[in-house]
Image (tube, grey):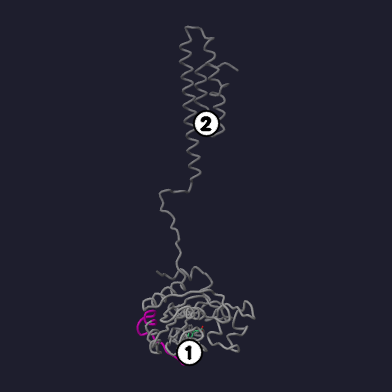
Amino acid sequence: MEEKTIPEYLQEVEEAPLSTKEQLENFRLLWLSKKGILPNLFTKMKDIAADKRKEFGQEINRLKELAEQKFEAAREHIETSAIKTKNAGLDISLDGMPINTGSLHPLTIIRNRMVDIFAGIGFTVAEDVDIVDDWHNFTALNIPTDHPARDMADTFFISQNPDIVLRTHTSPVQIKLMETQQPPIRSVMPGRVYRKDSDATHSPNFHQMEGLYVDEGVSFSDLKQTLFYFVEEMFGEGTEIRFRPSYFPFTEVSAEMDILWKKVNSQTGKEEPAWLEVLGCGMVDPNVLENCGIDSNRYTGFAFGMGIERIAMVKYNIQDIRLFYENDLRFLRQFVGE
Ligand code: PHE
């Protein structure tokens, strides 16, 4: 290796390029590593004349200090700028990103509200399975074999003979309650039901909440009063409703209840008042009570069944039932429930 004077070495260290990792490593190899210039100079100490040795020693120590200082400073600089590049665009003083907590589906909000209203006047909640046998969905409810609800076009059959079906209403829960309990029975039954039915106000899978009250002396006026109370709690005082005489195989007398809502006229786009059927109701047919082992001479009862979707459509003025099932966040985010 060509010999240089210490001042020459000092100048070289001073001017060494040290801005990349590679240059840093080359510098280390050249000056500081075991076979580098500095250790080499220290081994030379012993060849220096005794009277010059002290001075030489001081000079190479200065060189060593400078080389180490330059190396450390350059290393630190390269490391911190690497961190800066990695974090470019990250501002740790900014607020955190909000975490979306989601919200209840409008049908859940309405269902909870309905349950609350009836719970306030002493109704308990009863729920059961969606797949039921012929007895619980039809026969115990006085629905004869030639009834249209039993048609393949109306009902989803899982198997036939014996018939197993997706329940077409939540009335099977009423049957199970009456089979297993004696009056007084006062419950609502919310749940999914299935019918082959599909348009703007019908869906093959929708939700119902039925209610049942069986005791001594229950009358049709109790039924009307209960439903009046429900409607005013749900939609506010003065909401207009009407009862129409109707027919159900499992109630005698039977009625349907409509609510006056604002329907958008598809031709003019304007809102017009219109009646929307929201529920069926009536006095439980004595045969049905007897089918379940309840003495129809002693007890009477009323029952009603309403579509949760229909109640939600009136409450929020939603024109098309299919909006509930599309899971479009722009729709779902508009509802706030407890
Ligand atoms: N079960 C009937 C239906 O699904 C509703 C109803 C329930 C009607 C109770 C009268 C009494 O349509």
> Is residue 214 rendered to the left or right of residue 47?
left
Residue 261: in magenta span = no
x then y, percent, for residue 20: 54, 34
Label 1 secondary element:
helix
Tell me the quarter of the image containing the N terminus.
top right
Magenta span covers which residues? 230-246
Is residue 274 or residue 1 the one in the foreground?
Answer: 274
> How far apart are labels 2 and 1 at the CA level?
99 Å
Return the disc, 2 or 1, that comes first in the chain's sequence: 2
Residue 245: in magenta span = yes
x then y, percent, for residue 261: 43, 84
Is residue 84 or residue 43 the one in the foreground?
Answer: 43
Quadrant of residue 185 within the rendered picture: bottom left
Q: Which residue is mark 2?
A: 18
> Is residue 198 rendered to the left or right of residue 229?
right
Q: Is residue 230 above or below residue 246?
A: above
